[in-house]
Amino acid sequence: MIDFEPTEEQALIVETVHQFAENEIRPVARESEEGGALSRSVLESAHELGLVANGIPEEYGGGGEPSAILGCLIAEELAWGDVSTALGILSPSLLALPVALLGSEEQRGRILPSLAGPTFVPGALAAVEPRFDSDVHRPQTTAKREGDGYRIEGTKCQVPWLEGGSDVLVFASEEGETRGFLVPRDAQGLSVEMEKNLGTQGLPLAEITFSDVEIPASARLGGEEARGMEEIIDRGRVGLAACAVGMSRAALEISRDYAKERETFGAPIATRQAIAFKIADMAIEIDGARLLAWEAACALDEGKPAARMATLAYSQARRVALKVSDDAVQIFGGHGFIRDYLPEMYLRNAGGFISSFEALTLV
Amino acid sequence: MTISFEITENSRISVDHYNKMAREEMRPISRKYDEEEHTLPVEWVDYWWSVGRKGAPVDVAQPTDGFVTVCIQAEEICWGDCGLYLRMPTPALGGSAVGAAGTPEQKERFLSPFNEEGHPIWGAMAITEPSAGSDASAIETTADFDSETEEWILNGNKIFCTAGEQSATVDGGITVVWATVDKSAGRGGIKSFVVPANTPGMELIGCEKKMGIRASDTASLRFENCRIPKDHLLGNPDVQKKSSKKTGDKGFKGAMATFDASRPIVAAMAVGVGRASLDFLKEELEKQGVSIRYDAPPRELTAIERDVIEMEADLQAARLLTWKAAWMMNKGKPNNLEASIAKAKAGLAVTRISQKAVELLGPVGYSRKVLVEKWFRDAKINDIFEGTQQINQLIVARRILDYPSAMLR
C-alpha cells in the first residue's frame, strides 16, 4: 500500500539526527570547510549517538539488516547540517555495507567488529578515477591474478581518507569484470596524495595510486560466485541523492529566512514574486527528488532491481542540488557570494554532485 | 505506517482495467474526436455510461490506495485520451464542489443520479469569467435572494466551463456556479450554487475552439435572472464580512478547498498525457535500436539518452508528488501545499515532456499521422487549468514563507 510516512521508530531517529545536525554539525560547517578538516569530536559524538554503519549484523555488534530507506532519512538530515561532515560520519558504511553484503565469513569477522566498536573508525572506498570519462561500472584500475593473489594497478580519486581505519575497498577490473578488493591502507605500493577540490573541503579526499600492490586472493569481495559491484553503486547513488536533497533543503531554508528579512523598496524581498517563485520552485523540486530517492531505497530494501531508479533519483537530485544552491546564492545577492554566508559553499558542493560524486556514501 | 511505494493489488487491478480501456476504447477514436471538435463522442459516452462507470473489478474486501487509486485511474484514462476523459458522463468538478461544500443531504440529492439508470448525465463547475480567472475572488456573477419565492437569482457570464455544454443542456445534469451574494464582502461573499440542466435563465452561448483537448466541451454560459431553489446553495449561506477577523473568509476558503481535492487528479491526468508521449518516444527509439543506458556515466550518454533520463525522472517525480498529495487526503491531513506542489510539478514537467517528444521525433513528432503532436497540444492545458503554474507557485510560496495571501499576491 502506498505510504509516505516513516515508522515511529524511524521518525524518532530522524528527529534525533536532526537535533544533532542542528546543534553539532551546522555550527562547525563553515569552520570545517575553511580549515580543510572535519571535527574529530563531531565524528566521535555521532558514533556515540549510535550512528553506526548501516547493515552490520548483530553478531558483529551492529544493528542487523541494512535499511536503505532509513539510510536515506539519516543521510538527508546529516547533509542538511553539512555535506562534508555527513560524508565523514557515514564513511564507515563504505566498508561495512559491502563487506556485510558481499563479504566472506573471514572478511566480515576481520572488518566489521572494529567499525561497530566503541570509537569511530572510518571506512574508505575507491570507485572514481581521475579522468574525465571515469566510469564506476567499468574502472581502468586492474586486478590481475598472480599466483596466490592479485596485483592491483591504477589510480583512484575522491577516496574519503579519514585518519584511522584498516582497509580501502577498491573497484578494479578483473578480466573485464568489475570487482571489489580489500586493500590494507598501508599496503606496499599504495601511495596517497590529499586532494584539493571545488567544494566539500572539510572532507579529506585522496588520490590513491596503486603500483604493483599485491594482495591475497582472499581480499576479493563477492565470494566464489564473484558477485559484482552493481548493487553497491546503486546504494551509492541513492545515498548521494539523499545527501543532495538534505543540502538542498538547507539551502531552501536559509533562503526563505533571508528573503523574509532582507528588504527592498520598503518590503521583504520574499513578498516579490521573482523571489517567492524561486523559493516555491526550490520546495517543489526538493520534494520530488526526495520521493525518487525514497522509491529507489525501497526497491533496494525489497531486493528488487534498483539500477534504473537509483540513476533517475541521483540524476534528478544532483540537478536539483545545483539549481537550488544557485538560486540560494542569487537570493542572497552579493552576500551569497561572500564566504561569511553558506550559499556559496552549497553551490560549490553541488559542483561535486553534478560532476563526479559516486559511492561517497552507501545506504 | 511505513514508507512504501508498492501499490495494492486492487490498484494493480485498476491499472490493468483502465489501461485496457484506454487502449481498446479510447486510442482508436482519439484522432477522430480531435479532428471533429465539438462532436459528442457517442460511442465513448455510451461505453462509459453502460460499462465504464461500473469501475474496475476490484475486491472490495481488500484494501485500496484510496485517493491514490483514483489518481492511478485518471492517469491510465488520460494515457488513453485526456480530452475524452473530460467528456465522460460523471459529476466531474461539479461533484468535487458538492463533495467539498455540500451537506450530506445535498450530496445525496445532487450526486446519486449519477449512479442511476437512464440516459448519461454530466456535472461541471463554472468559476471563470471573462475578467476573472486565477483571481477567483474577483468574480462578478451575482446571486440575489428573493425572499418571497425563496429562490436565488443568478446573473452573470461564465467561460471555460469544462463539460459545460452537456451539464447545462442534458436533463439531469448539474452545473455548480460560483457567484457573490454580497460584493461588499469580497471573498467572504462568494458562494457556490447548483444549477440543474435546462434551468430557465441559463443559456449555453457556445464552446471554445482550442489548441488541444478538443474532445472536451469548454462552454460559455450566460445567466440571466436564472432562478434556483434556496437549498441549492452549497454549505453555509451566511456572509462572513472582511471585518470579522475570527471567521475571516471561511466560505471562500471552503470553496477553494475543492481544489485541494481536484489538483492531485489534474496532476495525475497530466502524468497520463506525459507518459503517453514518453512511452511512444521510447517505443520508437527501441525500433531504431536505441536503448537507454541507465548505468553509463553522464558524459558517455548520447543527447537523446540524457533527455529521456531527464524526462523519466521528471515524470516519476511528478507522479510520486501526486500520489503523496492524494495519500494525505487518505490520512485526512490538510494537503493544500502538497496538492499545489503536485500540480505545479506535473503541469510543467508534462508540458516539457510532450514538447521534447515532438522535438526528438522530428518529422514523426510533427505529423498528424501519429498522436505525439496531439499530446503536445493536450499537455499544455495541464499547466493552466485548475490553477496555473503561477497560482500554484504562489500557494506553495505562501505556505513555505508562512505568508497570508495579502502579503504575497
Image (tube, rainbow, N blue to C red):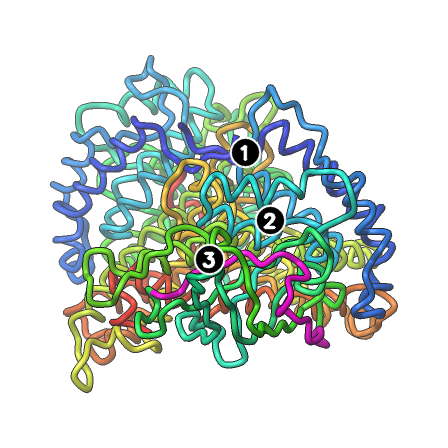
The residue sitting at 28% across, 52% down in the picture is A83
Kindly identify which numbered label has been placed on residue A351.
none
- Looking at the rendering, the stretch of residues picked out in magenta corresponds to B189-209
Is B219 drawn above or below residue B87 in the view shown? below
Classified by dominant secondary structure, the portion drawn in magenta counts as strand
Label 3: element kind: loop
**Could you tell me which quadrant the N terminus of chain B lies in?**
top left
Residue at mark 1:
B65
Of B211 and A350, nearer the camera is B211
Of B388 and B218, nearer the camera is B218
- Residue A15 placement: quadrant: top left
Mark 1 or mark 3, whichever is nearer to me: 3
Of A230 and B47, nearer the camera is B47
Disc 1: host chain: B
Visible residue check, residue B169: yes
Query: What type is the residue that disc 2 sits on?
Result: Asp
